[in-house]
Image: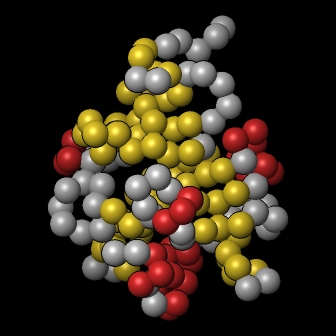
Amino acid sequence: MKTSQLAPAERDAIFRAAGFRKQNGGWTNCDGNGEGRLDDEWVDGGAIRDLDGDGQAEIILVDSGIACHGMTGQGYAIMASSPAGWKSVHSNSGIPKFLATRGAGGWQDIEVGGPGFCFPVLRWNGKEYALLRHQYEGKPCRLPG
């Protein structure tokens, strides 16, 4: 499914559940100056995808703004449908890259890109995404210091 196929009311519900607020016809997160997006162009592989292999699509929202996300200038939120509506599974500053490797429950690992040359890889542990390792171009690395 493409993000353009979501009804406007559904898009609004997803942003609201992620804690975004509507402002000047768009969606913003923490600083009021950023721009929230639900757009296939902003997420490698598309913003609607089945991250845990259960047949239900999750939604990846992207938020931009240096006041919220520092030098990276971008953050993301992973939203999942539940019987009570949309809920946040995970959010972070950085540029998400979904890897072929998987954690508990089949959730895809996430490399979180940003400035520098050593990026965290997060793995779902059954409750949350937690640090698994650091890597650069698929090879282990260590943060300076």
**Can residue 42 be spotted in the picture?**
yes
The colour scheme used to paint the residues is secondary structure
Q: Residue at x 25, y 54 (%)?
A: 52
Q: In which quarter of the image is the N terminus?
A: bottom left
Picture layout, residue 136 above or below residue 128: above
28 up-or-down from 109: above or below: below
Using the image, determine if residue 14 lies above or below residue 142.
below
Quarter holding the C terminus is top right
Residue 139 at what x, y percent from top left? 41, 17
Query: x, y (%) of residue 96?
Result: 50, 46
Could you tell whether 108 is left or right of 2 in the image? left
At x 24%, y 69%, the residue is: 56
Numbered marks: total:
0
- Where is residue 32? Give x, y as percent: 79, 67
Say which residue appears at 49% left-offset and 13% top-offset: 141
Q: Where is residue 24 in the image (x, y as percent from the top left)?
A: 79, 83
Residue under the image location 18 percent in, 66 percent down: 55
Q: Is residue 4 left or right of residue 116?
A: left
Q: Is residue 129 visible?
A: no
